[in-house]
Image (cartoon, rainbow, N blue to C red):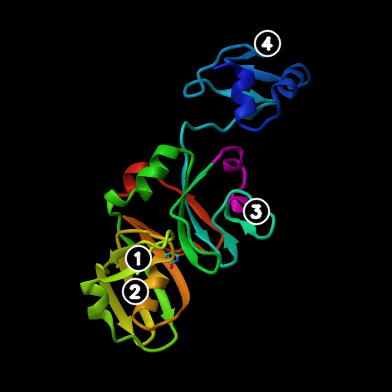
Amino acid sequence: MRIDKFLSNLKYGTRKEIKALLRTHEVIVHQNRVIDPSFSIDPTTDLVLIDGEKVFYKEHIHLMIYKPVGYLSANHDTMHSVIISLVKEPFDRFDFSIAGRLDLDAEGLLILTTDGNFAHQIMHPKKHINKTYEVMLDKPFVHQNTLLKGIMIKDGYNEEYFAQAIEIKKDKEYVTIVIDEGKFHQVKRMFQAVGYEVLRLKRTRIGNLDIKDLKPGEYVEFERNELE
Ligand code: URA
């Protein structure tokens, strides 16, 4: 890959700005100063230094992030804070896809990945990846058998579908539910369908990934094979 493309992909500037950067800063590859923007590097093996600082690069990055309440599961928005704004150096130089959105008023585990294909796979209904949610309802819950048997609810396109809980644990109005899909407002709509309002919703697990001791806004890298 050309060095100007490599640095521009990592948000060091436009191609024109990179051309200037190569002239005004010391960019080193294999102990040699690089000035030619068309100089070719292999990003996976070559170490690039700018003024003595290593350029952080990985082909793909996967992050588990704790989405706080009030953040939108989006890259940009004019009204609300977005989850991507919480990602800091050196990861903020990469473009992330969001796998499995959470509602604005929901919190918990969200996956950000630079691998669009991986994001797509995580969300694919055929994959049936288990997701665990802890919810607080408006009253003590007694309808676990109905949700374990399954009910018909509507998706984001107003189409009816069969939604079923895989596992339910409860302590009065506090319920932990596992489902293996992720349709629009699915958890809220499942509880609504049997007469409850979800007052708080937190996703704690996706596949084998657990939110563990992450705090709101914190994130940690994971490897693709850790998901399932
Ligand atoms: N189900 C919901 O209703 N909301 C979410 O954010 C996630 C699952």
Disc 1 and disc 4 in contact, CB within 8 angstroms: no
Q: Viewer-nearest of labels 3 and 2?
A: 3
Q: Earlier in the sequence, mark 3 or mark 4?
A: 4
Question: Camera-side residue: 25 or 92?
Answer: 92
Q: Quadrant of residue 186?
A: bottom left
| In this view, 151 is above or below 48 | below
Q: Which mark is residue 176?
A: 2
Q: Earlier in the sequence, mark 4 or mark 2?
A: 4
- From the image, tell me which residue sits under label 3: 77
* Magenta-colored stretch includes residue 17: no
- Does mark 4 have its CB less than 8 Å from ligand 1? no
Residues rendered magenta in the picture: 84-95
Q: Are marks 3 and 4 in contact (CB under 8 Å)?
A: no
Q: Position of residue 147 (x, y in %)?
A: 27, 75
How far from the left and from the top, in percent, is residue 137? Answer: 42, 82
Quadrant in which ligand 1 is drawn: bottom left
Of the numbered discs 3 and 2, the one sitting upstream in the chain is 3
Name the amino acid type tagged 4.
Asp
Q: Which residue is mark 4?
A: 36
Q: Residues within 10 Å of mark 2 (few under 14, many from 20)?
A: some
Q: Which residue is mark 1?
A: 132
Neighbours of disc 4 within 10 Å: few (<14), some (14-19), many (20+): few
Mark 4 element type: loop
> How far is the residue under mark 1 from the one under mark 2?
7 Å
Relative placement, left or right, of 198 versus 68 is left
Q: At numbered mark 3, what does the secondary structure look like: helix, strand or loop?
A: loop
